[in-house]
Amino acid sequence: MPNDLARDEYDGKTDKKGGGGFFNRIMGRGGAGSNTKNNTSAPGSPAPHVPPVSPPAMDDSGWPAGLQPGDGGLIREEDVTVAQLQQLERTLRDTLRDKRSVYESGKDMLARHFRDVDDGSGDVDIREFCAIWSRLGVEVTGAEATALFKKHGFAKGIIPYKRFMELLLKSPSRTLTEGTVKKGAFNLTGPFTHNGKIIYPQCRKGVYPPSNWTKQLGARSAELPDASLRLEFVYGYAGVHNTSSNLFYLNTGELVYYTAAVAVVYNRQKHTQRFFLGHVDDIRSLCVCPSEVSVAASSSQSSETSGSAVVGAGTGSKLRYEARRLVATGQIMTEDVDPYVSIWDSMKIGTNDHASAEVRRLSFPKEAHGICAIQFSPDARLLACVSMDVDHTLYVYDWRKNVCLFSGRSFKLEGTPPQVFGITWNPHAVPEKHGRKSQAGGPSAVSSDQAVSSDAAYEVKQDGYEFVTFGVKHIKAWRQTGSGAFKAFTMKFVKCNMQHVMSAVYLPPSERDGKSRILTGHPSGDVYVWRDDNALRSIAAHRPGPAKVLSDGTKTHHGVRLSLLRDGRTLVTSGGDGCLQVWDVNSGTLKEECRRGEPAAIAAPPRAGGGKVDAHAIRSFDVLEGTNVVAVGTHRCDIMELNVSSIGSSRTQGHGAVQHAGGVTTFIDGHEADLYSIEWHPTKPEVFATACESSRLFVFDAQRRVVMKTCKVGFLARACAWSSAPVSGSPSHHLAIGGKSGKVKVLAEDNLQPLFEFHDLRQPITDMKYSPDNKYLAVAGHDTYIDIYNVAKGYQKVARCSGHSATVKHIDWSSDSSIIQSNCASYEILYWDARNGKQIVDNQRDTDWASWTCALGFPVMGIFPDYSDGTDVNGVERSPDGNYVATVDDFGLVKLFNYPCVCEDSPAKGYSGHSSHVMSLGFSKQQRWMNTAGGKDRAVFQFVVQTNAMDGNASSSPYVTAHTVTGRAPAMAASSKPAAAEKVWADLDGDGKNFGWKTVSSDQRNK
């Protein structure tokens, strides 16, 4: 019975499509090995002599004719890719299988040929090796032989042929599993000497150290990285789910707002930011202290008094804070931290006194879930807070003493909290002992949630404080009783339609009856006028604007926001229609004829393809003290500023005309939907692109911290990728965008014009990468496939990698563009031949990867936190110099490790600020920045990478090679279907940022 080589000597997968080696077939040098019939004899006949294959003619140097050192040799082994080398080994095995006989196995036949040239040393050199395989019908070049020798650890051009046969004829998996198997990553204390298979909980398949692994690299993994990250800028604003005003001017003229778990103080002149990082999860409410206040200094603050006047000295000293300097922010609960409110000094954050910036912290029980609304009293003595529990419990604190004076049910309604949207105090109901003396130089504007009048003529002395809470189809008045408690009075809509109440403001006492009216804003665009807890009438102030979905799933509109200037006579309203309107309320009430000037609209770029203007719905606004300047936060998570003087001061006859406000400045560009991907430009170190589900692509300049260009892509975007180099036939790089539906669109870098579009996957795309040589684009998605496209042939699909059992999450290319590695949601690591999409089962322990973004693998074994199930880490990125690896996870953390990271519980530097589920990250080309994409918080965090050696172009890591992209891909094929003649791709708004299809006449097109 024949010796079955496939069964007894090699149990791996084989390629039966012909011999000659992968590299040989590409070069047109196919061998005859796979076409030779088995040499068998009839049973019972004498054992035949196996005739050797006729040897090729040899030259004088001993090489087969036509095979010279210059054809490969020792100096060209780097030209042989990993995939080619692995295919060559499969071809050698197939050749031995084809040439075996009943009486001589393939192994025995190969040994016989080796013995023919053996000089007694048991070794063969490269020349002898190539000659032997040439006799067997396989042409092996000197370069291939050299690379093969090096792979098996023999780099001097000589290999023991018995050892070679043992390695060649064993399956790759059997070779790797020889020896001990280590369970779990390395311990922090070592040893780091294991060189075999390692199995750890987050990965289903075993991983292997590289052949050049040293214990010094393992010891470095057990140390903290010498680099660090510093938050420089946050792109974004919480304009989607905020229920109360969250954008205010401070006494310095800076803006304060929040996004995710970071409170931001923005300098309008310098376009820079400072941050309060005292929260660990989403901030849901923010307010500014409206009055000057003195606070007893804590032990840590008594010696840290920069910018604050000190009242008294020693024990019992107080710090005096100017009006609109202190800020209060409330956050939701986490698994480990109860909800709390921080009152902090806006002047100390971003300075050496940052640690003492928090003045007070008010803690709430875990049952409160979070704080959805907060507001200081007019005299800044009290702070009212509404929690996110079922009862929406109201708390009134003497915050300076950290004492809760009152708590009670605010509102209970079936539905998802928050059902209470905000709080507004009555500035004319302040107890006499806490009353304030008017100051002519006081602030001139107050937002809707904290309207305060400094005019003595409008002050009304009452027995106690008063405020209103409002939200889902309700508004309640809370009045302080003689005992100091607060009693609720439900206000009635009477003849007005019951709607959600989005904002409220108290007017000065009426000239006619001396009573203060309350104005409320509603989703319909109406403003209701209230007196004695009853709605009197409705004023159509704004159009409804675009619809939105509340946290409980109900649809509504963004509604009207109100702000009363401190003169007590001027009211400003904003609406979902993107307009600002000024009203004269000197009479103490509001009527249609009280309009002052035309409404000012914040202009929005036209939709791609022309048509209806998509207005910015205004979610919050504030007026700068002593000016007509208004800051606006929109539902697109943008922050803008404009001068309201353009509205005009003359009365108008109606509400028909809309004047577009001039001089609108955009400070912050945000994303209005979930943000999934961020990708840095491969050659321009300051440029990066983002992909989110708003159907809009953004290209940012990290140096200037602005949007360079944007366009609508026509579908919900999930991933993006830059080409590795400019594509031949095109003046710029390509930018590929992958969508939630599986569609892919390729854009030109210079004007974002669509070039190609294809739709082979049917589920969301998770990752996309161009090969380092710029010839291919790999696209992975929820379909469990990886599709490979030829860039030069107009993105023709050339292969599909099929074998994963769950969503493919991350992919990486080898440095030679021949192999792809991938991770999936079922904890698998698989490898693929990029030229045909076939799975590679051979060992990849020594493959050099152009990038490392996979969450599984030997060099990232230690990135997972305790008790992780492998799904917690959403993004991984190796730094360009190969010294560090950063991760983002489900807990809102950004972590920086040393690379490779192979120790369990590897030490890392962690950075908070994002809310849960940070989705993506990336280092800039020169490693100056590292940016992160915040998923549902829709924010991009830009970190500065601070290292001892800031040169990101050189590689200082012994574990990874630095790679430089050179050359261009072959010429492009003709583009797909051209655009219609009546449409052109053009700059839509004239500033070179917003691009899209624009309908023009033929005359305009010819121009």
Image (cartoon, helix red, strand yellow):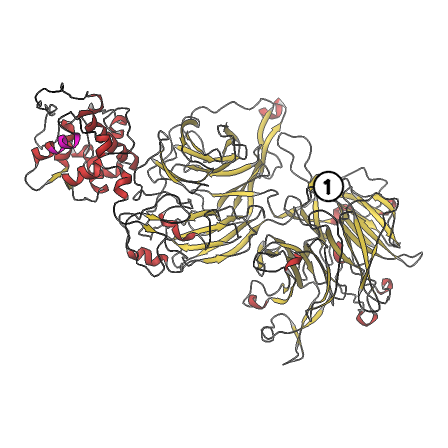
Query: Is residue 152 one of those drawn in magenta?
Result: no
The kind of secondary structure element at disc 1 is strand
**Residue marked by disc 1:** 556
Q: Is residue 217 visible?
A: yes
Q: Name the spot of residue 514 as percent of width and height, x first.
A: 91, 59
Left or right: 373 in relation to 509? left
Whether 394 is drawn above or below 703: the answer is: below
Q: Residue furthest top?
A: 42
Task: Report the quarter where the C terminus lies.
Answer: top right
Q: In which image quadrant can residue 282 be found? A: bottom right
**Visible residue check, residue 952:** no
Magenta region, main secondary structure: helix
Would you identify the image quadrant in which residue 104 lies?
A: top left
Q: Quadrant of the N terminus?
A: top left
Q: Magenta residues?
A: 105-111
Judge whether 582 appears above or below 377 on screen. above
Estimate the x, y position of residue 861 in percent, counting from the top left.
39, 50
Q: Nearer the viewer, residue 662 or 463?
A: 463
In the image, residue 144 above or below residue 581: above
In terms of depth relative to the viewer, which is nearer, 673 or 168?
168
Q: Nearer the viewer, residue 483 or 475?
A: 483
- Check the image and report above or below for 761 versus 456: above
Q: Position of residue 84 (x, y in %)?
A: 28, 33
